[in-house]
Image: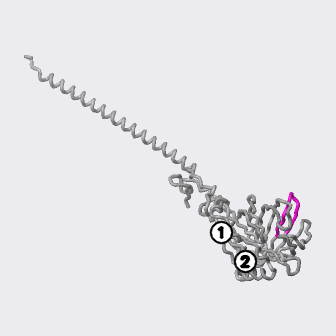
Amino acid sequence: DIQERGMGNIQCGNTLTEPCLGEKDIRYDAGASNNFVDQSVVWGKMAGYFKTEHYYYSGNYTPIETSSIASLVVKAFPSPGYENFTVDGTRIYQHNYVFFENAIEGGPSVMRYTDSSKHSSHEKDGSAIVLPYLTSFSDFTSQQEIPSSVSYPVGNNSLLATGYSDSVFGFNDEGYTTWIETKTCLDEPCDNMAVTVENFVDGSRVVSLLGTQTRITKDEFIEGMNQDYVDYNVFNASQVPIPMEASCNNVDQCLTEEQWCESGDPSCSESPYQEPDGKVKPGVIAGFTIAGFVVLLAILYLVHAYMVKKRDERNRVKFASRVAQTMSIRKSARSLTPDM
């Protein structure tokens, strides 16, 4: 297909011009999809509803049995929860819910939720740009203004993500952390997954998470969440409506369309990879040059032939005129008489 950057510009990829960049570099191919599932099958496989179970470890891989969250001592080994992972074109909405049971039997518990959003990139390589995310514990809410973090597909069954966080809430408050997350399908439908998250501060591991995810239906997700609110005696302030009322749990802090676009969502932002004007093939230029030279020679020959023809015509006219003058003089001489 012929691609062009703008009206009136030279088109690339036709008989006379060199191939379009988009034929070799997908970033320049305006016809290549920006949607996640078109770039990597792993995104579609990992979408859905899941029951999760997390196990937290300290930097030396000692199990973290309890932790202090929202002024409560809670159990953390394991921590049950849920995930709602939605893929919608160029956007991903990920919602994680983790229940932390009060260490005191029958005491009130808390539920932590994290709203994370991602969008595909103009690189068109299947990578996802992780946007600032929202984490909440009961009446504590934090908007994570993180530097650009990226999640990459690895083959058809895994994801590798890297990023930054202010802290690991409830487990580490030592400041800015770097995290590395892996997520791997354990079967072909990806109904079961293994998850690992490593958190580092100044190069030292501070908290590790090992977890599993098992696919469930939407109804099982809704029923399970609402039942766990009751079973774990979760604070009302720590609960969020299920099913969700918007694209995030805290409606007032959902990303706006403007924020999506400003962050570089390909569905509403211009790609920096624009197909340049087409370049004429060197052979075509040489051909036109030779053709032009041939045409010039032909024109010069025609001009020369025309001038020779005109010269010959002038010479014939002159010759005829002189012949006529000579004949006229001789005739006049014969007409003279002796008396004259």
- Quadrant of residue 182 within the rendered picture: bottom right
Name the outermost residue toward the left: 339
Reply above or below: 122 against 288.
below
In magenta segment, residue 149:
no
Task: Work out whether mark 1 precedes mark 2 in sequence or the reverse, and give the earlier one.
Answer: 1
Q: Residue at x 62, y 57 (%)?
A: 271
- The answer to whether residue 165 shows anywhere in this view is yes
- Residue at image mark 1: 38
Left or right of 293 in this view: 72 = right
Q: Which residue is drawn at 49% across and 42% down?
A: 293
Q: Position of residue 326 (x, y in %)?
A: 21, 25
Write down the region rendered in magenta.
196-208
Marks 1,2: beta carbons within 8 A: no
Amino acid bearing label 1? Asp
- Residue at image mark 2: 49
Quarter that holds the C terminus: top left
Marks 1 and 2: which is nearer the front?
2
Disc 2 packing (10 Å; few <14; some 14–19; many ≥20)? many
